[in-house]
Amino acid sequence: MDKKVSELLNTQINKEFYSAYLYLDMANFYSSRGLDGFANWYEIQAKEEQDHAMLFYKYMQNNGEAVTLEAIAKPDKTFETLMDPLTAALEHEKYVTSLINDIYDAAAAARDHRTMQFLDWFVKEQGEEEKNSSDLIQKMKLFGDDVRSLYLLNQELQARTYSAPSLEL
Ligand code: FEO
């Protein structure tokens, strides 16, 4: 595998675990505010990010590339309002999309079609992640200021259940 592609894939394992950690921090924030539904939403999001990390990990192993696990950074966002994690999540997902695009570009430059095909799932997934984040911001803008509506939104988010990623390696 091209050295740059391999390095970027390895880095992405760390980025996805960091994403899991960041979302767990958001879940923790909402738990501390008594919003267990929001906490549930982000706990499941954290699980999905761990799945993403493992997909990169397995893909590298399956292709005979050495994996190097680096330290996972401390979540560095501070949350004060109930909206803060939602906007931070969208900003973070846009950043992750840019990372996936960078790997895709490197794979294309190296004519590494297999990696491009592997990344196709993530390109689509990022579209969904950004949409979910935007939708949540929209709902919070509409309903967040009314306690009864916030209660219902919290219940809606409580109903989210975890399912394993649709991509298998
Ligand atoms: Fe692994 Fe939320 O992107």
Image (tube, rainbow, N blue to C red):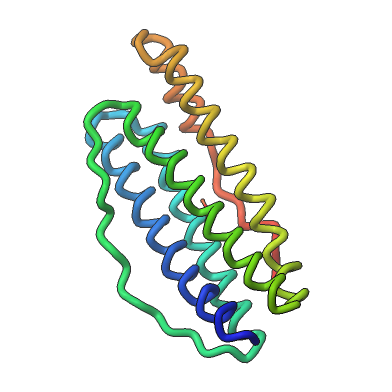
As rendered, which of 44 and 92 lies closer to the eye? 92
Residue 112: image quadrant is: bottom right
Image quadrant containing the C terminus: bottom right
Q: Residue at 63%, 85% (x, y): give it.
A: 2
Q: Residue at 49%, 68% (x, y): give it.
A: 12
Q: Position of residue 139 (x, y in %)?
A: 49, 20
Side of 47 where 109 appears, left or right: right
How many numbered marks, from 0 up? Answer: 0
Q: Is residue 123 above or below residue 112?
A: above
Image quadrant containing the N terminus: bottom right
Side of 122 where 34 appears, left or right: left
As rendered, which of 74 and 3 lies closer to the eye? 3
Q: Residue at 38%, 16% (x, y): give it.
A: 144
Q: Residue at 56%, 52% (x, y): give it.
A: 97
Q: Is residue 107 above or below residue 74?
A: below
Q: Position of residue 14 (x, y in %)?
A: 42, 69
